[in-house]
Amino acid sequence: MSKIFCGWLLSLLLVFSVYAENVNPSALPNLKRPANPWCVPLVSRLPKVSLSDCQSSALQASGAVSHKGFPLLIRDVPANDISDPSARKQPIRILLIGGIHGDEKTASAIVFKWIDKLNTAKDKSANEFHWKIAPVVNPDGLLATKSTRVNANGVDLNRNFPTPNWLAEAPQYWRKKTQSDPRRFLGKAPLSEPESRWIFNQMEQFQPDVIISVHAPFGVLDFDGSGTPPTKFGRLLFNRVGVYPGSLGNYGGVHKDIPVVTIELPNSQQMPSDAEVARIWQDMLNWVQENISPIKVASK
Ligand SMILES: [Zn+2]
């Protein structure tokens, strides 16, 4: 190869690399930019959730952000038109929350799988409900170098809800029953954290008929509030875990009388099989259909 040709090739490569470094993707209409830039960090932590699963979940930034500034994401899925409008005045409203504890990775991942089921619309009853879905309500905990139960401020968000007598009961419970376990630190005041405030605001604005919150790894179902608890979702059986000062179940179920189902998956790192993911979803839909009444919305 001649020296002249080599020099020409080198200049061409140099020009191209300078261009590649400075190019603005928005100026190139044919280059697709990701619709949801948050998906790249999220899927790096979530078992069995692909980038396309996350992109097609169509989550939106709510405007609120976590302690470290990560957007708190939500998907609003209004009910489809109901064929017989006289049969039901209002759709049942479901607030579905995943990953309030950031190190329970499957608790967020499974919610992405259920959004996909909702998107593919094979189940009619799922589309009769009005959903608000937030699969990653503690993004800082999930995205920490080593994922943490608590948020970036060291607070267990599931102890930070304003249950009655929080100031008297919650600190005492934390000191005496948990021996001041830092993984269960309740925060300095109820709703001291942006993530718990955001969930609280969703409850106030959306007025859900039922709240479903996904955790791991106890492998059971829990239920707070009046009404009939679920007996079985997939392989998960009803078995009370407990009621804690400042927990979402205590605040929503006991204090606000909104039924709160806590789903505890059996493993926080490994997803259940696809068949089990589908069974839990289907059993959950059936239970909501049979046990939750939308009539309460009108009287709230
Ligand atoms: Zn948990």
Image (cartoon, rainbow, N blue to C red):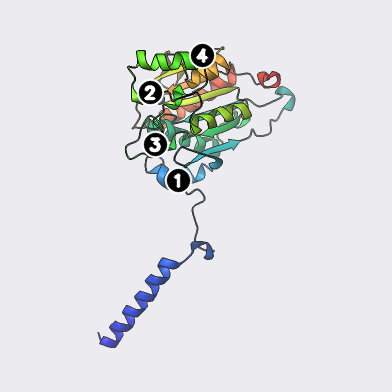
The percent coordinates of residue 172 (x first, y second) are 41, 14
Q: Quadrant of residue 83?
A: top right
Q: Real-space Cα distance between discs 2 and 3? A: 16 Å
Q: Nearer the viewer, residue 161 or 111?
A: 161
Percent x, y of residue 31: 49, 61
- Judging by the rendered image, the residue that carries numbered circle 3 is 142
Type of amino acid at the residue the image marks with label 4: Asn
Amino acid at circle 2: Arg
Q: Which residue is mark 2?
A: 184
For the residues labelled 4 and 3, the Cα–Cα distance comes to 30 Å
Depicted 23 relative to depicted 186: above or below: below
Please give the residue where the numbered disc 4 appears in the rendered image: 165
Please provide percent x and percent y for residue 248: 49, 22
CB atoms of marks 2 and 3 within 8 Å: no
Task: Give me the residue at 47% from left, 13% from top.
Answer: 168
Q: Which residue is mark 1?
A: 39
Note whether 223 is above or below 98 in the view shown.
above
Q: Secondary structure at mark 4?
A: loop
Label 3 sits on what residue type? Leu
Image location (x, y in percent) of residue 205? 63, 29
**First-in-chain label (1 vs 3):** 1
